[in-house]
Amino acid sequence: MQVLVRDNNIDQALRALKKKMQREGIFREMRQRKAYEKPSERKTREKAEAVRRARKAARKQAIREGLIAAPKPKPRFAGPRQPGTAPSMARPGAAEPKI
């Protein structure tokens, strides 16, 4: 695995490396190999993963065919906000700045 470091920006290169490792599943594999896994536990886990994959594929196929509605997209904003409040508005009862 290779990551380019541009302008000696190591933080950006580390982020890119972590993202690549996450995508490849290296962290999950490291966690699994930390301790011995019995063959029976491995079979159970692999069977559960296969069931999960099959359900996901069936759900996606049903969405493509229009049998079920697609999930609503999640909102992309910084955090929970209450409607009608702006960050610059003073809160009622808050102390006024003294000049």
Image (cartoon, rainbow, N blue to C red):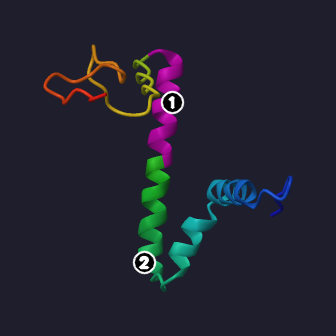
The residues colored magenta run 53-66
Q: Quadrant of the N terminus?
A: bottom right
Q: What type is the residue that disc 2 sits on? A: Ser
Q: Residue at x 41, y 68 (%)?
A: 44
Q: Residue at x 45, y 83 (%)?
A: 38
Q: What type is the residue that disc 1 sits on? A: Lys
Q: Residue at x 58, y 70 (%)?
A: 29
Residue closer to the observer: 87 or 70: 87
**Of discs 1 and 2, which sits in the foreground?**
1
Query: For the view shown, which residue lies furthest in the front direction?
Result: 99
Q: Where is mark 2, residue-wise?
A: 40
Residue closer to the observer: 97 or 60: 97
For disc 1, the neighbor class at 10 Å (few under 14, some 14 to 19, many from 20) is some
Q: Quadrant of the C terminus?
A: top left
Residue 91, quarter of picture: top left
For disc 2, the neighbor class at 10 Å (few under 14, some 14 to 19, many from 20) is few
First of labels 1, 2 by sequence position:
2
Q: Where is mark 1, residue-wise?
A: 60
Query: For the view shown, which residue lies furthest in the bottom direction?
Result: 36
Q: Residue 12 location in percent, x, y? A: 72, 53
Q: Residue at x 48, y 80 (%)?
A: 39
Q: Is residue 50 above or below residue 40?
A: above
Q: Residue 64 location in percent, x, y? A: 54, 20
How far apart are labels 1 and 2 at the CA level?
Answer: 30 Å
Q: Is residue 40 above or below residue 82?
A: below
- Secondary element type, mark 1: helix
Q: Is residue 6 above or below residue 38?
A: above
Q: Is residue 5 magenta?
A: no
Prevailing secondary structure class for the magenta stretch in the rendered image: helix
Q: Is residue 64 left or right of residue 71?
A: right
